[in-house]
Image (cartoon, rainbow, N blue to C red):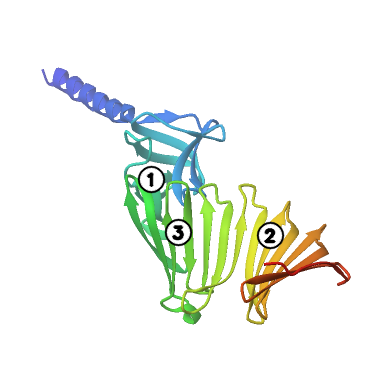
Amino acid sequence: MSKLRLITVLYLCLALKFGVAQEYVRLDKDSYQLHLSEYPKDTIRILEKGRKAKLKPGKYILQKNQFMGLSNAFISINQDGIVERDFKIEKDGKQGVVVVRHGVLQQMNVKAATLPDFQYTITDTSSVQRNFKNGKISQEKTVFYGAANNGKKITKVFFDNYYTVENDFDHTRANYRLDNTLIYSAKLNCSGQIQESKLFDAHGQLLKHTYRKAKVEYIDVYQNNNLVERKYKLDNRLYHEYFKNSLLVQRVVEKKDKGNIEKYVYNASGKLMDKNTGG
């Protein structure tokens, strides 16, 4: 009877060990790896042969990752296909604990023989506060502790198709598409008013540049990154300058006087080509 009990206990132990082992699905290390993406920033992704993969809900062991190379990462995937909770990475006696929220990496601590080996945080010089909406980042605040910039903040606000970055250090604001392509940038004064701005197309080419120089506001219009038109107002006169291959070819000057509009057209050399003083 004792022999039977021993066999039964051994069988139960093996079954339990086998059951626990089968709780996780081990993925091929040559095909799958854990990856930290640039957008959405610091999001943990699973790549299959270099491409983003969406795994079914469950528990997996990935044998290759960006943090510790060839090692075992034990992750859980939720119904949305993202890493749903903190997970461990093990390698040669080292164990890393990765803290995640909504699939976004917050921090990683690695210990070797119960002693700290290294620590991974989002940045070395800041702490990050993130707000989430429907599983997506809606706002991100980075607080820097550098002596020169103590208490200053960089704030990122995420929208459906783009996100805005406001930087208190150099008083700038910028809009980016979700693929990190710059679509708008501006320099602000200490009161938050725009001093200079640039607008870009979907391919990152400059479309419009607005700036102030000697208290005069200029608007430069570009095509294929070449200056084609400049507008500004000086001494109650409105100037339109036209360019070809970024070289001035024509200047049009308009002046309003008692309801009448005087219009003068000059060539690149400044010679008057046309004059209209009609109402």
Can residue 98 be seen in this snapshot?
A: no
Q: Secondary structure at mark 3?
A: loop
* Percent coordinates x, y for residue 269 in the rendering: 89, 70
Q: Are marks 1 and 3 in contact (CB under 8 Å)?
A: no
The image quadrant that residue 207 belongs to is bottom right
Q: Secondary structure at mark 1?
A: loop
Compare marks 2 and 3 and give the one earlier in the sequence. Answer: 3
Q: Residues within 10 Å of mark 2 (few under 14, many from 20)?
A: many
As rendered, which of 214 and 263 lies closer to the eye? 263
Three-letter code for the amino acid on which mark 1 is drawn: Gly
Q: Quadrant of the N terminus?
A: top left
Three-letter code for the amino acid on which mark 2 is drawn: Val
* Percent coordinates x, y for residue 107 in the rendering: 39, 56
Give the residue at mark 3. 122
- Residue 221: which disc? 2
- Residue 95: which disc? none
